[in-house]
Amino acid sequence: MTILNGQRVIAIEEHYYDPDVTAHFKGGDSKLGGRIKDDLYEVGAARVKSMDEAGIDVQVLSHGAPSTQKMDAETGVKVATAANDKLHQICQAFPDRLAGFAALPTADPKASADELERAVDKLGFKGAMVHGLTGGTKFIDQKEFWPIFERAQALDVPLYIHPGLPHEAVINAYLADYLDRFPAFANAGWGFTMETATAGIRIVLSGVLEKYPDVKIILGHLGETLPFLVWRIDMAINRPENNGVPFRDLFCRNFYITTSGFFSDPALLCCIQEMGVDHILFAIDYPFVPNAPGPKWMESLMLNADDKAKILHGNSERLLKM
Ligand code: GRE
Ligand code: ZN
């Protein structure tokens, strides 16, 4: 089935839209799907055909940003539960080809932990994906959200921290005057990166990884710049007058990264050198990124076959128990 000597290819940041979730999107969030909305809503045979053509065996599906992160607690619980049930049905139609990450109603952290457990135990999901700031303002490292990390550790499933649009004040101060001409400056062209890299750094600084040392965090987009920056952040955060934290050790121990939407040889080699190949997993970021170039890139990449196999499927099989 695949173009990589028949080996299994598992892609783990692959998005879809549920109309009962997107009905709640407002403002900039409702524009994120843009021209690819049809592909986001398509979760059946056409999606699997595109996977076949590209040589992708499995997509681990997650909703598109901001998923249920901007809903109030009551709405979020209702919508996330229904969306996860529907995603389970979607996966059941192609059980060898589609798997799921749960949506969590993060406005209610305790309900999120319970929904994560239900999604893993009852629906067979592989973990959960959280998209950016809860309510548009709160980073996920804040203590009220720690029950989610506690439950993820207990269930031994990863939390995938996916970008969302930056805080409105940040968009206005840093990005707004270019958005007419370059709307992607607020999302994949920088805003997403800045927002999610900040979330990743904050998770390490928060102490949640000392409290729950077996928590596994996944970042997409080759780690949202952090593998490149980890040495420098570690150095600065341990200067006099700082509390100090083994930043580089914690990041390289608890974090995993994916290739979603970032098919660059030098950037990937930097990630391998800093984090080790066991922490790098294959992803496309479909349909924001087309399927076909991903496996082709892996095929031509100057990397030994054993390490390619780890990235393409071995690490996902271990981390997501597939
Ligand atoms: C993504 O998931 O990477 C993404 C979005 C929305 C816009 C662009 C984009 O979720 O790359
Ligand atoms: Zn994505």
Image (cartoon, grey):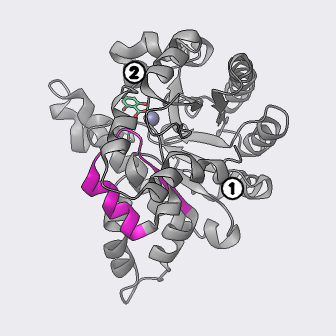
Q: Provide the residue designation for mark 1.
A: 149
If the picture is divided into quarters, which one holds ligand 1? top left
Q: Along the line of sight, which residue is nearer the eye, 145 or 5? A: 5
Image check: 144 left or right of 13?
right
Image check: 307 left or right of 313?
left
Residue 199 on image: x %, y %: 47, 54
* Label pair 2/1, CB-CB below 8 angstroms: no
Pointer 1 local density, CA inside 10 Å: few below 14, some 14–19, many at least 20 = many
**Between marks 2 and 1, how big is the CA–CA gap?**
30 Å
Residue 54 on image: x %, y %: 43, 26
19 magenta-colored:
no
Is 320 situated above or below 77? below
Pointer 2 local density, CA inside 10 Å: few below 14, some 14–19, many at least 20 = few
Query: Regarding mark 1 in the picture, which secondary structure is present there?
Result: helix
* Quadrant for the C terminus in the image: top right
Q: Is mark 1 within 8 Å of ligand 2?
A: no
Q: Residue at x 44, y 41 (%)?
A: 163
Boundaries of the magenta span = 255-274
Q: Residue at x 57, y 65 (%)?
A: 254
Q: What residue type is labelled 1?
A: Phe
Residue 262 in view of the camera: no
Q: Which residue lies furthest to the right in this view?
A: 122
Query: Regarding mark 2 in the picture, which secondary structure is present there?
Result: helix
Mark 2 vs mark 1, foreground winner is 1
Q: Quadrant location of residue 296?
A: top left
Residue 55 in view of the camera: yes
Residue 4 on image: x %, y %: 44, 39
Image check: 305 left or right of 125?
left
261 magenta-colored:
yes
Q: Which amino acid does label 2 sit on?
A: Gly
Q: Provide the residue designation for mark 2.
A: 27
Q: Residue at x 68, y 20 (%)?
A: 94
